[in-house]
Image (cartoon, coloured by chain):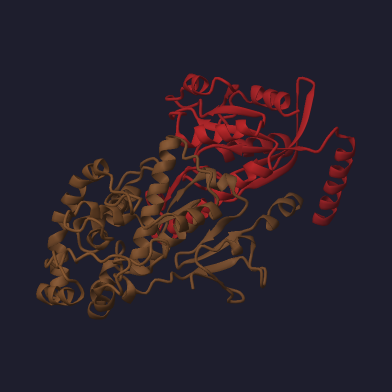
Amino acid sequence: MGLLTDLRDSISRVVDRLFSESEPKRIGIYGPPNAGKTTLANRIARDWTGDAIGPESHIPHETRRARRKENVEIERDGKKVTIDIVDTPGVTTKVDYKEFLEHDMEKDDAVRRSREATEGVAEAMHWLREDVDGVIYVLDSTKDPISQVNTMLIGIIESQDLPVLIFANKIDLEESNVERIANAYPQHETVELSALEGENMDEVYAKIAEYFA
Amino acid sequence: MPHQCTTCSKVFPDGSKEMLSGCPNCGGNKFQFKPKSSPGGVTGSSDDTPTQRGTGARDLTSSAADAVRERASQTDARPDTGDEEMTVSDWVETKDESPPPRETSTSDTTTAPSSPSSPSTQSASSTQSSSPSSDDPTGGESSREWGEWPDTPDESSQSDPAAASTPDPTRTDPSESRESKPHIRARETDEDNSQKSARTEVVSPEELAAFDAQHRESTDHPEPGVTPATSDETATPPESTSEPDTRPDVEGTTIEPSSDERPNLDELREELNDQFESIKIVNPGQYELNLMELYDRDEYIISLREDGRYVIEVPDSWGPGSRED
């Protein structure tokens, strides 16, 4: 069964590619740790393919390797785009195992997680350089959007001339402040959403179809 | 033997970037790092030639100083972003070309205006030994709040040796001396006590003075904490011959800046960080990442072990392969 499914999938993929105008664009979901990148990636993947991409967690650095979901076909307002979604580890300039100890983790596990997270950031940066065609930059709208990491990453993305959408996530939370994000990065379009609750996903998909088509 | 391929045991010299594209012998990308420093040779640092790299603590101090100076200059140029464009080769070249930093501080010691490094060397090495500031790299870090790279407490603590010494050994700019003077003075007074106690356990002031008298016509510093300066041309300086033999234990503690149980690892990390500064291993499980370096560079360390082993992910194993799978 599995084999047949695989075969069918790969055939349909080939057919899709034959008929699509171009290769699927690889869209990297970037942002600081705990911004909700994986929740968003899972939401998109579930909505359009039925599958999830990876486990979500409130503990930072749950995603420590970049994960992909290929051929996610999104259609909105007559626009159709096929993308590969890459969910990347949260980018940060410092990783400290002590952060994980607060989440009832043993020290050894915390140290290992810390190391993996560091490797994950390195991997994410590498992907950014060579392997993505566009970026969805996810920010936690309850937090100050101006940070060294955000400024640097968005600067890099701009220098690459990559199309970028800024997603102000977690608008379901009371402290959410989308305006702060829009003001911090006025050169880019900011889309508010709650990936967890599925709020404003219509606009999210419309923007994805528009920007990455 | 700084770097060694864990597969075929091929050894790469310190600062080599040969292995950054994989081991040329076997193609392996896992290496281990073994610092070449030998504790015994450490304080023979009333120094050799400016371009020659020393060993042990001297090397460590100078590389730390270089690192801080480099960071500082980069920070000046690009204050916020941590935007660093150095490659490994640049880094290594810079290190090789830059003269040992501590020598200028001798311009403070009016009694030995043209002499090289002794006083400052000692102040630098004692910084790492028993002075209160020796706790900074670890104690401070383990409990500190994370600041913004590169202005971390860790680096500022590293900057002490560097701050006590200005880059150009030949420069005797009075204004510069004046600037650094109070700082150095303060350090010297702070550290003299610990230096004395450390030294008197092994070598008495009288012994040193007598020894110095044999080698120098004028001995201005009978005090052990300030060993008489010797010029580069002078044959083997007294310190380098006598001290390693007489005080190996003292040196053993001198290089031990952080975690008590693993003295050598810190030294090792320091050197590793200097050579691959895109990821700085502050302590086990604590890392600082230079995003621009990670972004700019083809190769990077993908796997960090706590015992000095690391895996370098090389470009070939990325790109096409990762796109196809």
- Hey, which quadrant is residue B6 in on the image? bottom right
| Quadrant containing the N terminus of chain A in the rendered view | bottom right
Q: Is residue A58 visible?
A: yes
- Hey, which quadrant is residue B148 in on the image? top left
Residue B167, position as x, y percentages in the image:
35, 50
Q: Nearer the viewer, residue B259 or B197?
A: B197
Residue B103, position as x, y percentages in the image:
30, 56
What residue is at 27 percent from the left and 43 percent from the top?
B176
Q: Nearer the viewer, residue A163 or A59?
A: A163
Relative horizontal placement of residue B50, taking residue A201 as reference (left or right) = left
Q: Is residue B180 above or below residue B95?
A: above
Residue B18, position as x, y percentages in the image:
60, 63
What residue is at 87 percent from the left and 44 percent from the top?
A14
Relative horizontal placement of residue B41, taking residue A100 as reference (left or right) = left
Residue A212, position as x, y percentages in the image:
72, 29
Relative horizontal placement of residue B250, taking residue B200 as reference (left or right) = right
- Hey, which quadrant is residue A196 in on the image? top right
Q: Is residue B180 above or below residue A48?
A: below
Q: What color does chain A have in the rendering?
A: red
Q: Is residue B43 above or below residue A51?
A: below
What residue is at 61 percent from the left and 30 percent from the top?
A158
| Quadrant containing the C terminus of chain A in the rendered view | top right
Q: According to the colouring, which chain is brown?
A: B
Q: Is residue B125 visible?
A: no
